[in-house]
Image: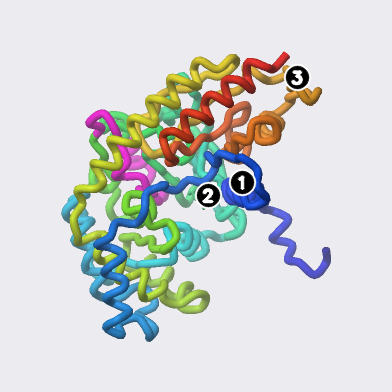
């Protein structure tokens, strides 16, 4: 349609949002659907956080605009968090708060990308990274990783992908969609390469930092390699660890000129993130943290359940990841087979569509994450529902001819 911007032809809708919407609509229409699409915790926002928001409303603290880049009190809490958990020092002028990690990442790309600039993105990647790069006028460069290396990028592959046009690498560990998390040694191998290429900036998306299992120790890139500090944007948010996806609060610490540019973009688009959500985020960062370990024990159980049950499904191979709340099984063993409806499964999209139609299990196909013949399961759902969903997947796979 001539009315719409040419730019839109470069991008596609978010597959994670599309599957979530589809599952919600089917449920509302009365279908028995188990949604494993949305990447969001099923747990409620903890009470102390909700109460902080209610108190802020009652005390009249939420009716006015706040500073565009986040209120001073919250920026101070973000600075404390970076210091306490990542040994990173950021002054208030180096911090921005936005409407979810998504807006923070988007602002950073819009603020820095010139036409033709390249952004390295290890694949499988979160569906929105390449699309945001394209919207900003840049070129996403995928570095494909494989299941047999735990979906982790080899330093040689990174080195090979770097060109004089590389502006950023978007690094996400633990990863959406694979759950893969880089150990200290694996991360060091990556940062060693980056140190040798001073024109490459690092967008570290640490959103799943707290969601790691089996005593895994998390490191943020600029924490592990201080020589990258000056060119790293460390992005995080309260959505996942604090069960606050709906509140939409993300934040970042980074070089002052970059943060200033991102704030300028925000000042001309959305202005401040919602005041009440900022007060809630302040309590999340400063308040008790003990529920995170409790949630993680449950997430770990669910991960183990999923991995074990999926590996018993015919044609499915499911590695065990270190973190996040996703598994990313291969369905290559089901490709070319025929479903009971008569539909031949040629792609992972066919696989997930038939699975939803016949068994009422919603998962996201792998192709939009950059590595196909696979699908993503979010196991952040009630354990009983998860068990039932895996049983249905086993039945679905068993019935393929
Ligand atoms: N990050 C989540 C997911 O991948 C939320 C949905 C989205 O924004 O993509 O499911």
The colour scheme used to paint the residues is rainbow
Tell me which numbered mark, 1 or 3, is placed earlier along the sequence: 1
Asked if 264 appears above or below 137 in the picture, the reply is: below
Q: Is mark 2 in CB contact (under 8 Å) with mark 3?
A: no
Q: Where, quadrant-wise, is the N terminus in this rendering?
A: bottom right
Q: Is residue 215 left or right of residue 310?
A: left
**Residue beneath label 1, please?**
23
Q: Give the percent coordinates (x, y) of residue 78.
A: 25, 62
Estimate the spatial distance between the alpha carbons at disc 1 and disc 2, rounded to whole Å. Answer: 23 Å
Which residue is at a point 41% across and 43% down the rendered structure image? 172
Which residue is at a point 32% across and 62% down the rendered structure image? 255
Tell me which numbered mark, 2 or 3, is placed earlier along the sequence: 2
Region in magenta: 190-216
Dot 2 crowding, Cα within 10 Å, few <14, some 14–19, many 20+: some
**Residue beneath label 2, please?**
129
Which residue is at a point 35% across and 40% down the rendered structure image? 196
**Residue beneath label 3, please?**
338
159 or 108: nearer the viewer: 108
Q: Is mark 1 in CB contact (under 8 Å) with mark 2?
A: no
Q: Quadrant of residue 284?
A: bottom left
62 or 269: nearer the viewer: 62
Secondary structure found at label 3: loop
Q: Give the percent coordinates (x, y) of residue 223.
A: 23, 46
Asked if 203 appears above or below 261 in the picture, the reply is: above
Q: Is residue 128 left or right of residue 176?
A: right
Mark 1 or 2, which is nearer the eye?
Answer: 1
């Amino acid at each position: 349609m001539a009315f719409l911007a040419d730019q839109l032809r470069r991008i596609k809708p978010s597959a994670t949002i599309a599957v979530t919407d589809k599952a919600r609509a089917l449920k509302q229409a009365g279908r028995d659907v188990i949604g494993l699409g949305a990447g969001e915790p099923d747990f409620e926002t903890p009470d102390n956080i909700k109460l902080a928001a209610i108190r802020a409303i009652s005390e009249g603290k939420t009716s006015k605009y706040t500073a565009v880049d986040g209120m001073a009190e919250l920026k101070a809490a973000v600075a404390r968090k970076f210091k306490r958990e990542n040994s990173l020092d950021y002054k208030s002028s180096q911090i921005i708060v936005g409407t979810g990690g998504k807006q923070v990442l988007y602002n950073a790309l819009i603020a820095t990308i010139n036409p033709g600039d390249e952004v390295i993105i290890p694949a499988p990647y979160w569906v929105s990274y390449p699309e945001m790069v394209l919207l900003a006028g840049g070129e996403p460069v995928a570095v494909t990783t494989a299941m047999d290396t735990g979906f982790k990028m080899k330093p040689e592959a990174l080195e090979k992908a770097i060109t004089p046009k590389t502006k950023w690498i978007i690094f996400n560990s633990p990863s959406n969609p694979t759950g893969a998390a880089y150990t200290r040694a694996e991360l060091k191998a990556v940062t060693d390469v980056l140190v040798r290429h001073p024109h490459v900036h690092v967008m570290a998306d640490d959103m799943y930092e707290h969601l790691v299992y089996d005593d895994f120790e998390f490191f943020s890139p600029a924490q592990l390699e201080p020589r990258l500090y000056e060119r790293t944007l460390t992005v995080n948010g309260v959505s996942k660890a604090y069960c606050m996806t709906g509140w939409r609060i993300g934040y970042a610490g980074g070089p002052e000129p970059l943060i200033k540019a991102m704030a300028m973009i925000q000042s001309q688009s959305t202005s401040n993130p919602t005041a009440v959500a900022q007060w809630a985020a302040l309590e999340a960062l400063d308040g008790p943290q003990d529920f995170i370990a409790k949630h993680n024990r449950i997430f770990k159980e669910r991960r183990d359940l999923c991995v074990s049950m999926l590996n018993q499904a015919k044609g499915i191979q499911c590695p065990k990841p270190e973190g996040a709340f996703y598994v990313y099984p291969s369905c290559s063993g089901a490709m070319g087979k025929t479903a009971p409806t008569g539909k031949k499964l040629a792609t992972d999209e066919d696989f997930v569509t038939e699975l939803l139609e016949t068994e009422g299990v919603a998962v996201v196909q792998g192709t939009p994450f950059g590595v196909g013949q696979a699908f993503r399961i979010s196991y952040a759902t009630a354990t009983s529902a998860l068990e039932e969903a895996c049983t249905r997947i086993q039945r679905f796979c068993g019935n393929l001819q």
